[in-house]
Image (spheres, coloured by chain):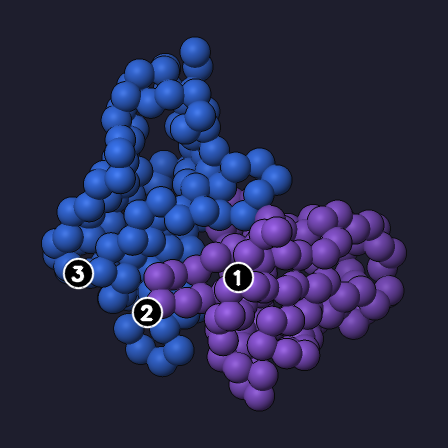
């Protein structure tokens, strides 16, 4: 089936550092979504992107929908302890039932 | 109350047992989904439903079945649980503004 390649799989950073993660695919998507998952909870939507080339911010988070529609990145600036968690990208397919395909996740750990 | 409620939150069951995971939503959405999460694999789609009469297999439906009892309820069953079905299971709904996930059911098959 379709796959999203998300990298890096894990990150260990110092508080205050910026973070960058990305997702690529061989498939074309009409929507890119970025989620965060805290321990014991379901994914929560951070940013949604609907147009190729779109750059959207949500506080310290910035995400972009790649021009080719096959990739997206998420940046977090000036990380804080509550940013710890697992971040997932998800792409919605253009064809068929428009299902969501998820990346493998990026586990973010922050050292105080 | 949560928009999407999953029960139970945790369950340990024995190999060969039948088990049902339940999901209910108050969002009024027609579209509901069941995903499975395994470490390093992200979320994978098991089944999805666009309304009470519309049930569709996802990418990993083998060993699972579902029932859409009402617009608000979508249950997932493991007819004969096996250890490699040990995972975190999420139910989700989809509306005009995206997906809403439940808090998950952690299932362990021993």
User: Which residue does the numbered mark 1 point to in the structure image?
Assistant: B92
Of the residues tagged 2 and 1, which is closer to the observer?
Answer: 1
The residue positioned farthest toward the front in the image shown: B1
Q: Colour of chain B?
A: purple
Image check: B100 left or right of A71?
right
The quarter of the picture where residue A19 lies is top left
Determine if marks 3 and 2 fall on one subunit. yes
Return the mark for residue B66. Answer: none
| Label 2 packing within 10 angstroms: few (<14), some (14-19), many (20+) | some
User: Which residue does the numbered mark 3 point to in the structure image?
Assistant: A51
Is A106 or B29 nearer to us in this picture?
B29
Determine if marks 2 and 1 fall on one subunit. no
Return the mark for residue A93. Answer: 2
Label pair 3/1, CB-CB below 8 angstroms: no
Q: CA distance from mark 2 to mark 1?
A: 17 Å
Marked residue chain, label 2: A
- Judged from the image, the secondary structure of the residue bearing numbered disc 1 is strand
Q: Residue, x 38% and y 61% (percent of image)?
A: B98
Of the residues tagged 3 and 2, which is closer to the observer?
Answer: 3
The residue positioned farthest toward the bottom in the image shown: B53
Instruction: Tell me which chain appears blue.
Output: A
């Amino acid at each position: 089936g379709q796959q999203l390649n998300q990298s890096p799989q894990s990150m260990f950073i110092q508080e205050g550092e910026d973070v960058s993660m990305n997702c690529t695919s061989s498939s074309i998507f009409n929507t890119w979504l970025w989620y965060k998952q805290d321990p014991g909870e379901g994914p929560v939507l951070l940013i949604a992107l609907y147009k190729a080339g779109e750059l959207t911010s949500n506080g310290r988070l910035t995400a972009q929908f790649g021009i080719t529609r096959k990739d997206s990145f998420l940046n977090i600036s000036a990380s804080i302890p509550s940013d710890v968690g697992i971040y997932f990208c998800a792409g919605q397919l253009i064809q068929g039932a428009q299902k969501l395909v998820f990346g493998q996740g990026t586990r973010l750990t922050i050292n105080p | 109350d949560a928009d999407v409620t999953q029960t139970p939150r945790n369950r340990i069951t024995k190999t060969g047992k039948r088990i049902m995971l339940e999901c209910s939503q108050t969002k009024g959405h027609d579209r509901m989904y069941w995903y499975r999460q395994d470490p390093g694999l992200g979320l994978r789609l098991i089944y999805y439903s666009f309304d009470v009469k519309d049930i569709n297999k996802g990418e990993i439906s083998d060993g699972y079945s579902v029932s859409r009892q009402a617009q608000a309820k979508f249950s997932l069953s493991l007819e004969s649980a096996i250890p490699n079905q040990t995972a975190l299971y999420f139910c989700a709904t989809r509306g005009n503004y995206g997906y809403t996930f439940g808090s998950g059911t952690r299932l362990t098959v021993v």
